Image (tube, helix red, strand yellow):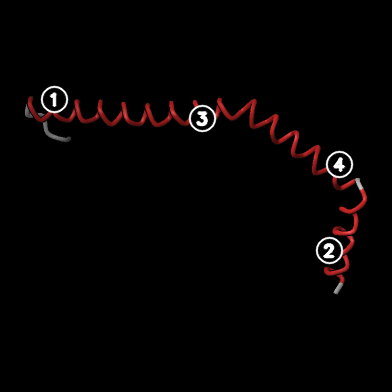
Amino acid sequence: MYYFLIQKRKINTCKHGKSAELIETLTTKLVEMAATYGPKLVLAIVKLFAGLWLLKRVGKLIRKSFEKANIGPS
C-alpha cells in the first residue's frame, strides 16, 4: 500500500511543473550527449569491427604461409 501512495504522489507531481521541467532537462541533456558522443561511438564500433576483420585476415595469411612452409603447430 505504501508503494502505491509513493507512485500516486509521483504521478501527481507530474501535473504541476517540477517533474515536467526535470523531464525536459533530462531530455535536452540526452539529446546533447547523443549529438556529442554518438558519432564517436559509431566510429569506435566501426574501428573495432575493422580491426577484428583485419586480424582474422592476417591470421589466415600466417596460417597458410606456415602450412606452405610445412611448419607444424608447436
Answer with mark 1 or mark 3, whichever residue precedes in sequence: 3
The answer to whether marks 2 and 1 mark residues whose Cβ atoms lie closer than 8 Å is no
Seen as rendered, the residue at the extreme right is 16
Q: CA distance from mark 2 to mark 3?
A: 38 Å
Q: CA distance from mark 1 to mark 3?
A: 35 Å
Relative to 6, does residue 32 appear above or below in the rendering?
A: above
Circle 1 SS class: helix
Q: Is residue 58 left or right of residue 3?
A: left
> What is the x, y in percent for residue 23?
80, 44
| Residue under the image location 93 percent in, 51 percent down | 16
Amino acid at pointer 3: Val
> According to the image, label 2 marks what residue?
7
Amino acid at pointer 4: Glu
The dot on residue 21 is 4
Mark in front: 2 vs 1: 2
Answer with mark 4 or mark 2, whichever residue precedes in sequence: 2
Q: Is residue 20 left or right of residue 41?
A: right
> According to the image, label 1 marks what residue?
65
Q: Quadrant of residue 55?
A: top left
Answer with mark 2 or mark 3, whichever residue precedes in sequence: 2
Q: CA distance from mark 4 to mark 2?
A: 19 Å
Instruction: Depth check: give the residue in front, 7 or 68.
Output: 7
Q: Quadrant of the C terminus?
A: top left
> What is the x, y in percent for residue 34?
64, 32
Answer with mark 3 or mark 4, whichever residue precedes in sequence: 4
| Residue under the image location 74 percent in, 33 percent down | 29
The answer to whether marks 4 and 2 mark residues whose Cβ atoms lie closer than 8 Å is no
Circle 3 SS class: helix
